[in-house]
Image: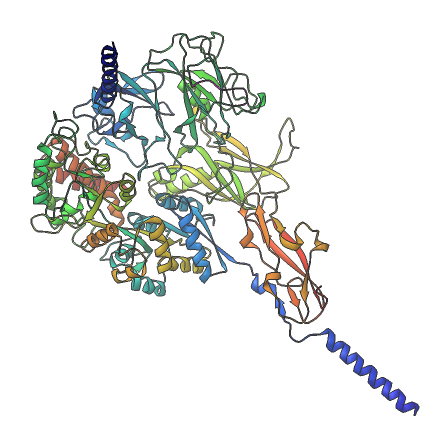
Amino acid sequence: MKKFLLGVLMMFSSLFLLGTVNAAETVTGKIVIHFQKWNGDYSDVGINTWSFPQGDPLSTQQGPTALGDKTKTDSFGVYWESGDITTTGEGSLGFQVVGFDNVGESNESANFDKKKYTNHQIDAGIIKDGKTVHVYMFQGSNNRTDNEKDPNGVVNYIVADPDKQGIMVVYYDSTGNYEEKLGVHSWGWAEGGNASRWNEPLKLFTDAGKSVAGVRVKAGVLYYADPVGTPGAIVYYGDGDNSKKTNNLEPMNKDNAAYVETPTAKGQLDIVYTVNAGNGNVSNENVWLNDAQKWSEKAFKFELVAFKAGVDGKDATGTYAANPTTVMVSTNQELTNIYVAAKTDEERETADATIKSWFTVKEITSAEGATTETYGDAINIKNVDYAKGTTNTTLKDFVLTLGSPLDNSKRYKVFFDDKGEGEAAKKHELELDLDREKPVITFLGTIAGKVEAERIIVVPWNKKFDQNLFPTYLISDDRDGDLKSYAYVPKGDFSTLNTNEEGDYVIMLQVEDSWGNVTQEKFTFRVTKDTK
Amino acid sequence: MKKILTLLLVLTGALFLVSCKKDKVGTDGETIDFSDSYSKKSVIRVWIDDEQGDYMKEVIKEFNKVYPNIIVEHQHKGSVDSREHLKTFGPSGNGADVFQFPHDHLAQAVLEDLVLPLPDATATKIKERSHELGTSIATLKYDETTGSFDPNNPDATERLYAVPMSLESVGLYYNKDLVATPATTYEELLAAGKIWNAQPSKDNDQQTNAQAGLFYLATSSHWADSYFMQQYYSAFDWTPFGKDLNDPSEVGFAKLTSAVTWIRDELKPVVTGNSAHDSISGGTNFENGKIPYIIAGPWNVEAYKKAGLNFGVVKLPTINGKETKTFAGAMMAAVYKYSKNQADAIKFVEFLNSDVAMEIQYRLKSKLPALKTDLLANIDGVLADTELMAMSNQLKSSVPMPTIPQVTYYWGPGEAMLKEVWNNAKPIAEALTEAEASYKTNLGLAS
């Protein structure tokens, strides 16, 4: 009996070991790569790939013409199917979606400089033996980590489990200000897809795409449980009802905006598109199922990009007044650079005047929160700077130089209108962010926290001044950050000290932010024999 | 008596007053005007590609030891973005005073009126210390009035426009676990490659290395990249735009027949077989330790080190006994032409050329300082860095990248020509004629 049991045990062990060995062996499977371009125009879309098997339908570089019928369309966008790929799971398959110029002509060629829509090394480990794995890529995604990497971090592709059914939740906030705790409250999904409790969001989202303005698009996958039941999810950031970005998303509820009448086959995903329409939003009017077009119309509607302060050595971005006479304007879409497209000096002059005519700046004269906003006269715009060089065919950043300064105790709006007609018209307005706060000087050491009259530093009479007695301080500014090294003592009544004569000497420290807001703080050196 | 007493009283009083006054006004102290020691500083903004900011933080700290009254604001900016953004933000004074860009952007940046030619005194200082390849790439002969780079234009002035910060070139990287002594000739390398390619693959003995895509020699780019392919062209005595790389009237594709024939008949069979120019993921193969050789650049070193590879770098092999000369590239820093603080900006670019700044760049960015070879000894660690020294050795025979702006129109036709020959078996003469025509068409469209 012992021998029999030992035999059975050995058989199980060898089967187990065999299984382990098999897992490391080569597998053969297919992949289907889905791609979504924000404007829904796929006429210029081709691919550039490497490491695909020789002769594979997706191998090497193929423009739209060469791809021909291999490019198929569905509600997500376009997709391409590979042939059988045999792999040990090591390494990767290079896959770039690239826009081609001169499509259909003899000089059809990939425009790697301006139209690299995706840039990936797909992990060969996603290929499953005898299965077809669906990979979803959004425009702007790039998971490269070499010299082609996205400097702001990986924007990945999404892989659907070939053995499961589920949904992908896509979420976009055009300001790019995604909350730190953003995720979903979710219930009724397969293991790993459910939030632990309310106000503890499941961190579902990863960066999956990037708008033309450089704002990340978030996405994450939820798989149905078995049996499916009535799963649901709410996009929110875990701070109560007011942090809801959507109401319940319930694919099995026929009255819900995310209702999936017939789920896609195993291994594929239905897509629930959402946009940020403000906090506490439970209308679900910002939710679309499998309708990329409606979502992108809403998500990427022409807008002036809102101000975002610069941090850690990065520039401030968006639309704002940098100083009283300079307004930075940034758009969320690339606009045709009609100046560079112009051929003659006369055409360039006209193009320049046209670009200038797109902008107006006015004071908001009505009170904040007024039902109807009223405006003062248009402020003279002396100049509009944009990329006039020889290679920029599109524009999205402008600098307006004003003829008269803005007053940071008032409010202003910038208006953009390209005078276009119909759906092509680009029109938007945005209140300007002005630097209304002065820098703050904070003294440290013995005079920390004291009012001006009490900021007294005792200096020994009839001795050389000890530089260590000069007070230490910090200076911060809401926009410009640390301004400590910018402080100075203006020459004049509050700049000198004579340690030969007893008395009080008031010294003034001054700092200005880039807007020109000035902060002055005084303290006193008291020269005295009595230094006890 | 009364008078005497009064006089004594007055005298004592006066003495008392004098001693009082003497007691109140010292002589050992000092008068300080803090507006001198805490004066308003000037500010310059620099756009340098340094995402983490640690490199610039150290450089600025050292710069401020020499120039304490200049505040340097660093903003991370990708070196390709710098030029683009300066066009928009520069004119209003919201751009950079100092910006960085790669070698091939210089002529365009000058043409776009972005770069201040460096004063003669600065140029002299820089030329005394910089590697000749770097200064030759950063020097242009330009006629500002007509926007002409024509070397024969009598009104054109030759000036130094930028400070070379680092130099780079591709080289031959090899896996020391697979190759004991690296090849010194392409004949030797390709012969060994044929044997390797035909051997069974280690991972799957049903396939040869070639069938498994594990070709002996790889490129970290692709086989139609003219920057990488210059080594082969040079071995057949060819550089674009003539011997001096500055004649924009033609690229000179017609003279490439021998080089392209060698590429098609000798190189291609060993590096891709019948497959396309970009069909092999050579970078991944080399990183995974599966192939012996790759043509790569210093930008790949970090990945190879991370992958734990036991690798080395050597000079590229010869072809028929002739040197394979690579293009030398450089990263450069320049002063914005309309900077409101040109004097301080010039001080900063000069400082970037100092031993101190170069040492920081080497230590934190692993780049080869663009200094004369004998000055490299001043930079701790560089001479002991075998990879960088191999590149330095490669650079000894490199040719500088062409700096005329028309070089922009060379890369596309150059790549298309090789692709046609490599992938579509187009007759070489036809492909070369088409490439020259394509260059001229692009040039015509651009002017």
Residue at the spot 7% in from the left edge and 36% down from the top edge: B195
Residue A194 inside the magenta-drawn segment: yes
Provide residue A413's location: percent of width, then percent of height. Answer: 56, 35
What segment is highlighted magenta in the picture?
Answer: A191-199
Residue A278 sits in quarter: top right
Provide residue A115's location: percent of width, then percent of height. Answer: 32, 32
Q: Quadrant of the C terminus of chain A?
A: bottom right
Q: Nearer the viewer, residue B276 or A167?
A: A167
Provide residue B213's location: percent of width, then percent of height. Answer: 16, 30
Q: Nearer the viewer, residue B309 or B65?
A: B309
Question: Vertically, is B40 above or below A370?
Answer: below
Question: Vertically, is B245 above or below B282?
Answer: below
How many numbered tags mark residues here?
0
Left or right of A221, for residue A285: right
Q: Is residue A70 visible?
A: no
Q: Is residue A27 visible?
A: yes
Q: Nearer the viewer, residue A430 or B186?
A: B186
Provide residue A146's location: percent of width, then percent of height. Answer: 30, 38
- Residue extending furthest front? A2
Q: Nearer the viewer, residue B221 or A285?
A: B221
Left or right of A370, for residue B356: left
Residue B38 sits in quarter: bottom right
Main SS, magenta region, reads loop
